[in-house]
Structure formats: C-alpha cells, structure tokens
Amino acid sequence: MGATALSRWWQHFWLDTDDVPKLLGAGTLARVEAQVAASEKLHSGEIRVCVEASLPMELLRRGLRSRERAIELFSSLRVWDTEANNGVLIYVLLADHAIEVLADRGLSARVPQAQWAALVATMRDEFRQGAFEAGLTQAVTTVGTLLQEHFPVVDEAAANPNELPNAPWVL
C-alpha cells in the first residue's frame, strides 16, 4: 500500500458521522434544510444534500471513489425518481475532500457540464477556507436558480409535492 493509499485509509478511519456537525458548524445542517425547502417552493425540482464523513471500510477496500459513491447514493436516495427527472444530488465526502454534483437527465440535458464544474470549484474554494456553510449555501442557491430557470413553478395554486426530504442526509 502506497503512502497516498495509507493516508486515505487514515482519513477515513479518523472521521465518522459525529464529526460532520463539528466540521460544518453548529446549525449548518438545519439552515441548509430550510434553504432547500424555500428553494423548492420556486421550482418543481428536488435538491438533496448528502454529507458523508468517511466511506465504510468495505467500500474503501474496493477502492470506491467519490463519483462512484455519489452515483450509488443518487440511486439509493431516489434522487433519480422525481416526476420530472429533475432531482439534483450535492454530495460531499469529507475524508477525501471530494465534492460531486449529480443532476438527473431532465436538468443535466439543459445545463452544460462547465456550469456544474464551476459550481464544484466554487464549493471547493469555500471549503478550503473552512467556510463549509457558505459552500453548501452557494451550491443550493446555484442549483435552485438553475431549477427555477428550467422548471419554474408556473401556477402557485397548483400542487408542487415535496418528493424528497429536505434535510441533508448525513452518513
């Protein structure tokens, strides 16, 4: 096992779910939940935030990377299962300092990959400065703006069901 692999194992061994609120800051998860709920009143899309402290050892042994894990969670959290295929997963893997944003086909077909890459770069810059809440807030704002642009609520009286939980999923 090389030095890089050993370092990765150590990071994953060291962090657990209890570390997430400490690293993100007090009240961050509740404020992100409120922001997601407010955003979803303006569009028909669904935003799901998932913060994982570290990978389970079996996934780490398999050499699973953040993108693969995000795809697994995109499926298991049913982000792909929205009526208009416009769910978005914002995934953060703290141990690897990794960020992935996955959009379902309804939105990804309308937003260029460069826009998603810019969103991830902005989050990464905020995170490097220790501003986790600012990075998550900016991501939810940007995704909400894209969803509002492409899937706006046209009739406020019409039903706009909340298809997925608004609370960030912490693993």
Image (spheres, rainbow, N blue to C red):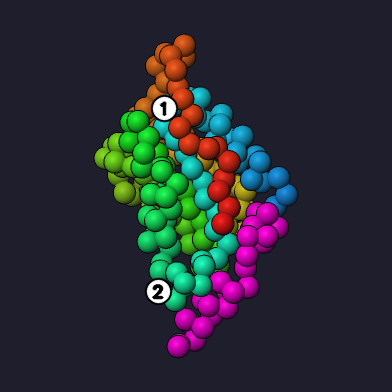
Q: Is residue 121 placed above or below 35 in the rendered structure?
A: below
Segment tinted magenta in the rendering: 1-24
Percent position of residue 43, x then y:
44, 26
Q: Nearer the viewer, mark 2 or mark 1?
A: 2
Image point 45% across, 88% down: which residue?
Answer: 1
Q: Quadrant where the C terminus lies?
A: bottom right
Residue type at numbered disc 2: Arg
User: In the depicted view, which residue is nearer to us: 66 or 142?
Assistant: 66
Most distant residue in the right direction: 26
Q: Which residue is mark 2?
A: 62
Residue type at numbered disc 1: Ser
User: Would residue 15 be found to the left or right of residue 71 on screen?
Assistant: right
What is the secondary structure assignment of the residue under circle 1?
A: loop
At label 2, counting other C-alpha atoms closer than 10 Å, the crowd grade (few under 14, some 14-19, many 20 or more) is few
Image point 40% across, 74% down: which residue?
Answer: 62
Q: Is residue 141 placed above or below 19 in the rendered structure?
A: above
What's the magenta bit mostly, secondary-structure-wise? helix
At label 1, counting other C-alpha atoms closer than 10 Å, the crowd grade (few under 14, some 14-19, many 20 or more) is many
Would you say residue 169 sits in the magenta stretch? no
Percent position of residue 153, x then y:
42, 20
Image point 48% across, 43% down: which residue?
Answer: 48
Image mark for residue 44: 1
